[in-house]
């Protein structure tokens, strides 16, 4: 078993989910009292959010690279960024360390492609939905056609992530708002929905979505276990 290096605290609400899923899946596969070998570098998310809001992606990249190098030095065999948004600097991070990076968009797109789907709706932070580092990768590498909500929908999705989900607040009224955004995407041709922020799976469960949904936290954590166990 190899050691998984997790960059978390982005936010810690979803980092908990990563740790839970990784260990549950490891025990499921290996049985007995097995659990995963993990190292966790956990940020103070308020500091990272301030850099995001300011658009200071260079400083955010420096911090992420420093975190990855800390995990590498501590013995991590791979790097897992426990955030969709912070994959904005995935390429820079991957070239800065001598450890493979397990990319969340790849882990998600491979499953969607395997299910025979092509047009998907993407929910995430404003950065993930509007910038090209995420949906562009899915299109270029996997041939997916990625739809995003309109401006009003993007505002709703982004606000709920930062004002509620990252603070551990799960509100039925916000679930209803997300469902309205999902319905809009379905009306525009989406065959499935990507829950492209690692906290969204706390709010939207499979039964809340009228079309298939892909929880990036779950799929990314499973990909990390696959890699660590050499499957």
Image (cartoon, rainbow, N blue to C red):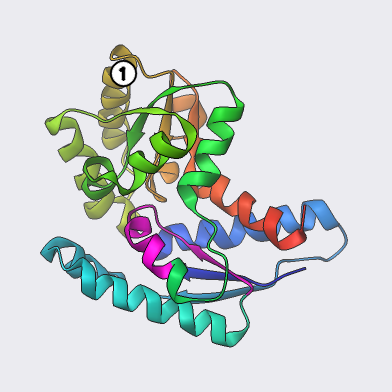
Residue visible at 60% across and 58% down? Answer: 20
Residue 87 percent location from the top left of the image: 38, 57
Residue 81 percent location from the top left of the image: 46, 63
In this picture, which residue range is highlighted in magenta? 77-93
**Quarter-of-image position of residue 61:** bottom left
Residue 191 in view (yes/no): yes
Residue 194 percent location from the top left of the image: 42, 34
Residue visible at 32% across and 49% down? Answer: 133
Please, is residue 184 above or below residue 111 in the view? above
Q: Is residue 193 left or right of residue 101?
A: left
Q: Is residue 208 left or right of residue 19?
A: left
Q: Is residue 121 left or right of residue 4?
A: left
How many numbered dots are placed on residues in this image? 1
In the image shown, does 52 or 9 lie closer to the viewer?
52
Residue visible at 23% across and 49% down? Answer: 127
Q: Is residue 223 left or right of residue 43?
A: right
Please, is residue 145 above or below residue 140 in the view? above
Residue occupied by mark 1: 183
Q: Quadrant location of the N terminus?
A: bottom right
């Amino acid at each position: 078993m190899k050691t998984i290096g997790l960059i978390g605290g982005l936010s810690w609400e979803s980092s908990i989910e990563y740790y839970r899923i990784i260990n549950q899946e490891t025990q499921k596969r290996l049985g007995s009292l097995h659990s995963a070998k993990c190292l966790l570098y956990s940020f103070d998310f308020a500091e990272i959010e301030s850099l995001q809001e300011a658009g200071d992606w260079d400083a955010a990249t420096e911090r992420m690279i420093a975190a990855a190098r800390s995990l590498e030095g501590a013995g991590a065999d791979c790097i897992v960024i426990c955030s969709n948004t912070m994959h904005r600097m995935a390429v820079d991070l991957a070239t800065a360390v001598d450890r493979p990076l397990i990319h969340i968009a790849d882990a998600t797109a491979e499953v969607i492609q395997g299910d025979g789907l092509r047009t998907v709706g993407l929910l995430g932070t404003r950065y993930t939905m509007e910038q090209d580092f995420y949906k562009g990768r899915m299109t270029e590498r996997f041939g997916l056609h990625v739809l995003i909500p309109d401006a009003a929908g993007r505002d709703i999705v982004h606000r709920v992530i930062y004002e509620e989900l990252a603070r551990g607040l799960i509100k039925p009224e916000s679930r209803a708002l997300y469902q309205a955004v999902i319905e809009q995407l379905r009306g525009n041709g989406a065959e499935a929905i990507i829950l492209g922020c690692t906290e969204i799976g706390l709010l939207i469960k499979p039964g809340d979505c009228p079309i298939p949904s892909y929880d990036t936290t779950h799929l990314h954590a499973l990909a990390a276990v696959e890699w660590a166990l050499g499957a």
